[in-house]
Amino acid sequence: MQVINMKRTDFDKYYKSPLHRILFRWVDIKKSGLLDEYISGENLRICDLGCGTGKISSRLAKKNTVYGVDWNESLLKIAAQNGLKTSKSLVEKTKFKDNFFDAVVMIDSIEHLHSREKIGRELKRITKRNGLIIIFTPAYDSVLWNIGEKFLNSVTGKKSDHTTPFTKESMEFFLKKNKFEIEKIKKINMGLGLFAAAKKTE
């Protein structure tokens, strides 16, 4: 199985559009703050799975090495300009060694994947023991998100392609099933988004 959105040819237009940059990117402020709160070390190896342009995770590259993984070459070029070491591959099957990363982040990418089982295995494989994983994804148990998604789809004329939507309950199940010790799961940005932080314990 492949990542659905990573080959969409209209991603460049989406990332450069005023709608993206002005109306919707305000939610990134909270995500950036949570990254700073949970990943405060230096000289760490960090992976951004499904990195896109790497706009949010690039703040971590000032003191750490951040690897960006995506399938879209145009987005990877922007991510490299933002300071990430880029790697073109499927998110569920990266080229990294086992237990390679101190932290792995997924910022609005996990909901685009076909298989929770595959991404769960890959997260466990590439993260060091006691390493941290952080996931941001839309909150599908939020009335506000479900209304907002319908509005966004109507404005853009495109579906969101979220094939693996998460609720707070299903995120907790996903992390526990894959043997991650949960540090925090909460809704952010007025309930539009879901934030999860967990450690690899095995």
Image (spheres, grey):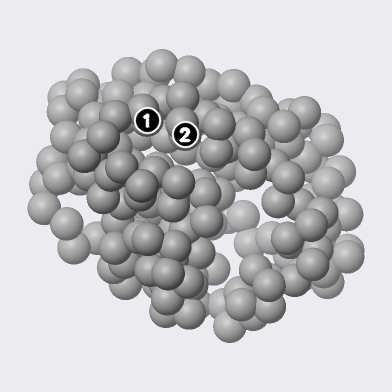
Answer left or right for 161 relative to 154: left
Q: Can residue 178 be seen in this view?
A: no
- Position of residue 83 relative to residue 135, above or below, is below
The image quadrant that residue 183 belongs to is top left
The residue indicated by pointer 2 is 35
Circle 2 crowding by C-alpha within 10 Å: few under 14, some 14–19, many from 20 = some
Q: Which mark is residue 174?
A: none
Residue at (55, 38) in percent of width and height: 32
Q: Where is residue 55 in the image (x, y as percent from the top left)?
A: 52, 56
Residue at (29, 68) in percent of width and height: 87
Answer left or right for 42 relative to 40: left
Residue at (21, 39) in percent of width and height: 43
Instruction: Give how far apart the Cα atoms at labels 2 and 1 are.
Output: 6 Å
Q: Quadrant of the C terminus?
A: top left
- Position of residue 46 relative to residue 17, above or below, is above
- Position of residue 184 relative to residue 110, above or below, is above
Q: Where is residue 173 in the image (x, y as percent from the top left)?
A: 45, 25
